[in-house]
Structure formats: C-alpha cells, structure tokens
Image (cartoon, rainbow, N blue to C red):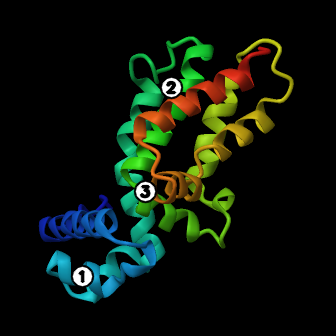
Amino acid sequence: MPERKPRADALRNRESVLAAADRLFATCASPEDVTMADIAAAAGVGKGTLFRGFGDRTGLIRALYESRLEPIRLAVAEGPRPLGPATPPADRVPALLDALLCFKIDHRHLSVALEGTASDSPYRAAHYDWWHGTLRDVLEQLPGLPDAGFTAHALLAAVRADLVDHLTGREHLTRERLRVELAAYTARVLGGS
C-alpha cells in the first residue's frame, strides 16, 4: 500500500502553526508564557489541530526546533566551508560552535523551552545527542586531544540555552561579543591539540 501524503490543508495548518509558534516564542518574555491556546489562536486553528499534529506542547516545540535547525544540519552534513565535512577539523570545531551559538541567540526562547522539556536536563534532548556526536566526531580527528567525548560535552556547555539566555538577557552581552568570547574559549580548549 503506498504511503499516504498529508493533505494540502494539513500541510498549510502545520506551517501556519510552526510560524505562529515561532513568532510567539521570539517575542515572549518567558517561554512558559506561550501556551497551546496562544499558538492555536495565533495560527487560526483549533487546539485539536495542534494536538493531532504534534501530540502536545513538547512535540510542537521539538517540531519547531527541528524545522529551524534543519538548514544547519544540512550544512554540517554536506555543505561547504566552514561547516561542511571538507573543512579541516581545527577550523570546523569553532565553526560548529559558532553556528550553534548563533542559532540559540536567534531562537533563544525556543531553545530554552526545548531544553526545559527534557526533564530539566538539556542532555536528555535528542538534539543534544546529535550535536554531541557531530562535535565529538570532528574532535576525534584532532591529534593529541585525549578525550573527544568529554571535550565535546565541555564545549557544548558553553552554548547551553539557559546560559545564552542569561548572557544576552540579564548581562546584555551582544551577539558579536558572545561569538568572540566563544571563539577565544574554544581556541584555549583546543590549544594543546
């Protein structure tokens, strides 16, 4: 039996819901302020549409995060420099971290909301496993680095959503300042390799 394609109206509703959720998370004071009712109203659909399409609030947040992250994943998997596989590992590690930092700055409240859905541990979120595995694999290509797995965890801790939210929101660090600080930190960590 051939696989059923989603109906055109279901695809339109999904895109409308994701766009509405994206706008709400981008403009909210706190991720907890965004409810399923708010998203349904902003998208012009019933709450039942949200629950049928995404299961629950966590499912919707994951779907939105994944849709926004997909261009970065493609660039990492097959793209050109600096993220793509042809980039030398010593250049690719800071590029990967910079891309993740910029993503989390651009999607700050969404990232905080997603990391908060994993039983209050960002390390249990599926996207964390992907980032850790990707970074670890690149770090393993650097000579003299004793434990690529631990180093990947330590570097990813520098771009946790709650830290990025704190630094940009409470300490008012600019995007460029954070990027410079992260690059310097990454260079210090990798300095011995």
Q: In which quarter of the image is residue 143?
A: top right
Front tag of 1 and 3: 3
Query: Mark 1 — residue?
Result: 40
Above or below residue 175? Residue 10 is below
Mark 1 is surrounded, within 10 Å at the Cα level, by few (under 14), some (14 to 19) or many (20 or more) other residues, namely many
Which x, y percent locates residue 71?
A: 35, 39
Above or below residue 15? Residue 37 is below
Query: Mark 2 — residue?
Result: 95
Q: Quadrant of residue 182?
A: top right
Which x, y percent locates residue 166?
A: 54, 58
- Determine whether the residue tagged by mark 2 lies in a helix, strand or loop: helix
What is the spatial separation of the Cα atoms under label 3 and label 2, in whole angstroms? Answer: 19 Å
Q: Which residue is drawn at 40% across and 29% down?
A: 75
Query: Mark 3 — residue?
Result: 108
- Determine whether the residue tagged by mark 1 lies in a helix, strand or loop: helix
Residue toward you, 154 or 53? 154
Q: Tags 1 and 3 in contact by the CB under 8 Å rule?
A: no
Q: Residue at x 47, y 29 (%)?
A: 77
